[in-house]
Image: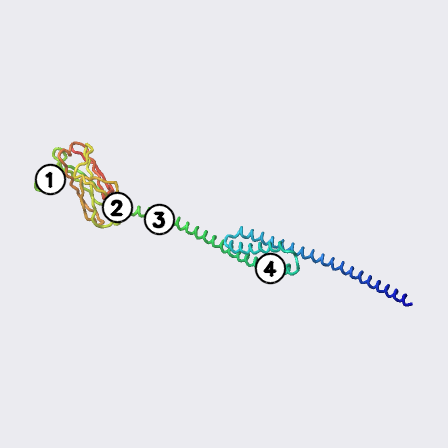
């Protein structure tokens, strides 16, 4: 009886132990599958993080290429993403690391939004500044063109005023003369009797002409094409244009008609028969001319 009871107990223990082993096997298999699934999920999350970081790098590259204002800030942000991506690739996926990486990705995305908004704002401001500069440059060019036009008009106006204010002469007459011992001057139409040449004219009235002393010059050229008289050389523009005259006279002009005569001395042999040319100048500007003949 005792032997039977022992066998029964042994069988029961063996059955219980087998059941426990079966249950343990089932749970072990279940835990293995769950761990395998968790690793797959973690690996998927790691791959997703790597993909998001890669997209962030691409977006920063595009932003850097388009934005010269914030290149330094964008480059530094991109470098931090590259470092994090290398760290993700080098470490095995686990829950703690994935959680930390996910937090870092969230921070980086927020920083990207802030930097991109700032870059867009700076780009807009830079574009506006460029537009303003272009507008200012256009306005400046228009002012320069206007100034050039006004300068041209002023130059033309000054030229007109200068011409309008210039001295003019009328009734110019030239003749050979003799000077008697008494000082009286008489006409001499023959070359053999003439001693000098007298040129007389009237300065016309002109309210635009500045009052004051005026230098008047004459050139008398004889039939042999020789300038007679004092041969006064004058350089008016302090350059190379030197004009030579036969005689001169300084008068005070008061904007009214003024009769003037200039007496030109002649050296021996300069007064010959033929036609003479007489040019009258106010400074360097010729204001009248005439001819006369000595027989």
Q: Earlier in the sequence, mark 3 or mark 4?
A: 4
| Residue 260 x %, y % | 18, 44
Which comes sooner in the sequence, label 2 or label 4?
4
> In the rendering, at what x and y percent does residue 107 appear?
59, 60
On the image, the x and y values in percent for residue 147 come to 37, 50
Nearer to us in this view, 150 or 139: 139
Q: Is residue 19 left or right of residue 290?
A: right
Residue highlighted by disc 4: 104
Q: Which residue is mark 3?
A: 151
Q: Secondary structure at mark 3?
A: helix
> Which percent across, then down, holds residue 216?
20, 44
- The circle on residue 267 is none
Q: Is residue 257 left or right of residue 116?
A: left
SS type, badge 1: strand
The crowding category of the residue bearing disc 3, from other C-alpha atoms within 10 Å (few below 14, some 14 to 19, many at least 20), is: few
Work out how far the residue at label 3 is from the one at label 1, CA to CA, in angstroms. Answer: 54 Å
**Labels 2 and 1: the sequence-earlier one:** 2
Toward which corner of the image does residue 198 lie, by quadrant? top left
The earlier-in-sequence mark between 3 and 1 is: 3
Q: Which mark is residue 179?
A: 1
Q: Is residue 155 or residue 257 the one in the foreground?
A: 155
**Numbered disc 2: secondary structure:** loop
Quarter of the image holding residue 286?
Answer: top left
Q: Secondary structure at mark 4?
A: helix
Q: Which quadrant is home to the C terminus?
A: top left
Answer whether labels 2 and 4 touch (C-beta < 8 Å). no
Question: Is 70 in front, or is 177?
Answer: 70
Q: Residues within 10 Å of mark 4 (few under 14, many from 20)?
A: some
Residue at left offset 60%, top offset 59%? 104
Q: Which mark is residue 166?
A: 2
């Amino acid at each position: 009886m005792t032997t039977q009871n022992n066998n029964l107990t042994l069988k029961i223990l063996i059955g219980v132990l087998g059941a426990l082993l079966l249950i343990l096997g089932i749970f072990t298999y279940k835990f293995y599958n769950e761990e395998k699934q968790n690793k797959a999920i973690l690996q998927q999350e790691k791959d997703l993080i790597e993909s998001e970081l890669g997209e962030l790098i691409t977006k920063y590259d595009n932003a850097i290429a388009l934005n010269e204002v914030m290149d330094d800030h964008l480059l530094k942000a991109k470098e931090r993403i590259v470092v994090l991506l290398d760290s993700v690739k080098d470490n095995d996926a686990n829950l703690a690391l994935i959680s930390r990486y996910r937090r870092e990705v969230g921070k980086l995305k927020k920083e990207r939004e802030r930097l991109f908004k700032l870059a867009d704002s700076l780009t807009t401001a830079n574009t506006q500044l460029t537009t303003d500069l272009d507008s200012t440059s256009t306005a400046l060019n228009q002012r320069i063109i206007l100034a050039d036009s006004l300068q041209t008009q002023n130059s033309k106006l000054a030229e007109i005023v200068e011409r309008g204010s210039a001295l003019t002469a009328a009734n110019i007459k030239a003749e050979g003369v003799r000077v008697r011992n008494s000082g009286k001057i008489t006409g001499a139409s023959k070359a053999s009797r003439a001693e000098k040449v007298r040129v007389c004219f009237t300065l016309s009235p002109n309210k635009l002409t500045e009052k004051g002393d005026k230098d008047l010059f004459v050139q008398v050229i004889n039939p042999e094409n020789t300038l007679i008289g004092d041969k006064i050389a004058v350089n008016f523009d302090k350059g190379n244009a030197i004009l030579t005259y036969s005689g001169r006279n300084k008068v005070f002009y008061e904007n009214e008609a003024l009769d003037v005569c200039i007496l030109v001395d002649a050296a021996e042999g300069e007064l010959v028969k033929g036609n003479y040319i007489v040019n009258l100048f106010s400074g360097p500007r010729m204001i009248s001319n005439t001819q006369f003949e000595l027989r």
